[in-house]
Image: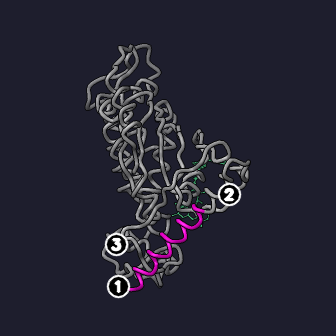
Amino acid sequence: MPISPDQQAEIDDLRAQPKPTLRAVSEGMETHLYKAHEVLDHGFIRVIDYMGDDAAICQAARVSYGKGTKSVQNDEGLIRYLMRHWHSTPFEMCEIKLHVKLPVFVARQWIRHRTANVNEYSARYSILDREFYIPEAGNLAAQSVINNQGRGEALSGEEAARVLEYLKGDAARCYDHYAEMIDQEGQQGLARELARMNLPANIYTQWYWKVDLHNLFHFLRLRADAHAQYEIRVYADAICKVVADWVPAAYGAFEDYRMGGANLSGKAIDCVRRMLKGEKVTQETSGMSKGEWREFEGIIG
Ligand SMILES: Cc1cc2nc3c(=O)[nH]c(=O)nc-3n(C[C@H](O)[C@H](O)[C@H](O)COP(=O)(O)OP(=O)(O)OC[C@H]3O[C@@H](n4cnc5c(N)ncnc54)[C@H](O)[C@@H]3O)c2cc1C
């Protein structure tokens, strides 16, 4: 269960006590504040705090004494200009603090993004909950034959059932031994910091994760992408929805230039120019490797 009734009551309590402020408020973000958005079978993301909005980006870019905003169209144009020209520091003026509950193997990928501040639930101090990520049948996929880092068709029938049984059975047995090692019926059991090494990587952990908008976009660009593993991508997708409501103009520019845009090498641009002049360019005449050409074709269709 992502959120227990007690935890939900705490969240409802927080949401029931709005406070007046002189700070910038994003109406879209206020609807998300504290609420848990469920991800995977037991996970969630929820916004704990945030700083800034679209106007804060313009304010910083214009180094303004006041609001720093002009017309909506003007501000959106400025934000798009900043995004287009990799003028990143105005985006760093916005911050977001998330509470995330995620499987340990997803956390290992996530933590590689070094430009955030993290505080994780301590399994030295506390006992981890008996919650494991078990993929839905459609996500129980075979190893991809074309991409060593990817997956192919979903397993089915007996094979899928056997894999599910292994995942559930192994997790349950490891957790039983973990609990048993900690609790020695009244006597001191094994230290929590040691007992936890018996737990599988699909157990859930939690952390607070704070990052600025520029580095969040970098994270989302990599992790909301089709090349990212499904289990981290669904977290990135959930964050994308929140960010779209928080800073709609900045998110729109990010979607257009980063998610929807593409980088072309000098050779690729030369090929596009030759094609526009009517030349039939092939991989052999492009000067690109087979891999580069495949990706180039993927971009230009
Ligand atoms: C699809 C995919 C597959 C991957 N596969 C693997 C894999 O097989 N093995 C593996 O180990 N990793 C893998 N990674 C992780 C990847 O190599 C990066 O470590 C991860 O995406 C974090 O990226 P980053 O360093 O740009 O991000 P961040 O750490 O958030 O940094 C953001 C930016 O800040 C700058 N920066 C941050 N710290 C420093 C620093 N110390 N010095 C200089 N500049 C810095 C860089 O410009 C960096 O791009 C994979 C990632 C993806 C998305």
Q: Name the residue located 44 percent from the left edge and 30 percent from the top edge.
A: 50
Q: Label 1, on which residue?
A: 157
Q: Is residue 240 above or below residue 51?
A: below
**Among the two numbered marks 3 and 2 on one chain, the one whose residue lies closer to the N terminus:** 3
Tell me the distance, in whole angstroms, between the alpha carbons under discs 1 and 3: 12 Å
Three-letter amino acid code of the residue under disc 2:
Met
Tell me the distance, in whole angstroms, between the alpha carbons under discs 3 and 2: 35 Å
The quarter of the picture where residue 135 lies is bottom left
Mark 1 Cα shell of 10 Å, populated few (<14), some (14-19), many (≥20): few
Q: Is residue 162 magenta?
A: yes
Three-letter amino acid code of the residue under disc 3:
Gly
Q: Name the residue located 40 percent from the left edge and 48 percent from the top edge.
A: 2
Tell me the distance, in whole angstroms, between the alpha carbons under discs 1 and 2: 36 Å
Q: Is residue 227 above or below residue 95?
A: below
Three-letter amino acid code of the residue under disc 1:
Gly
Kindly state the secondary structure of the residue where label 1 is placed.
Answer: helix
Q: Main secondary structure of the magenta part?
A: helix
Q: Position of residue 241 (x, y in %)?
A: 33, 46
Q: What span is colored magenta in the figure?
A: 158-176
Which tag is nearer the camera, tag 1 or tag 2? 2
Which tag is nearer the camera, tag 3 or tag 2? 2
Q: Label 2, on which residue?
A: 181
Q: Quadrant of the C terminus?
A: bottom left
**Among the two numbered marks 1 and 2 on one chain, the one whose residue lies closer to the N terminus:** 1
Quadrant of picture, ligand 1: bottom right
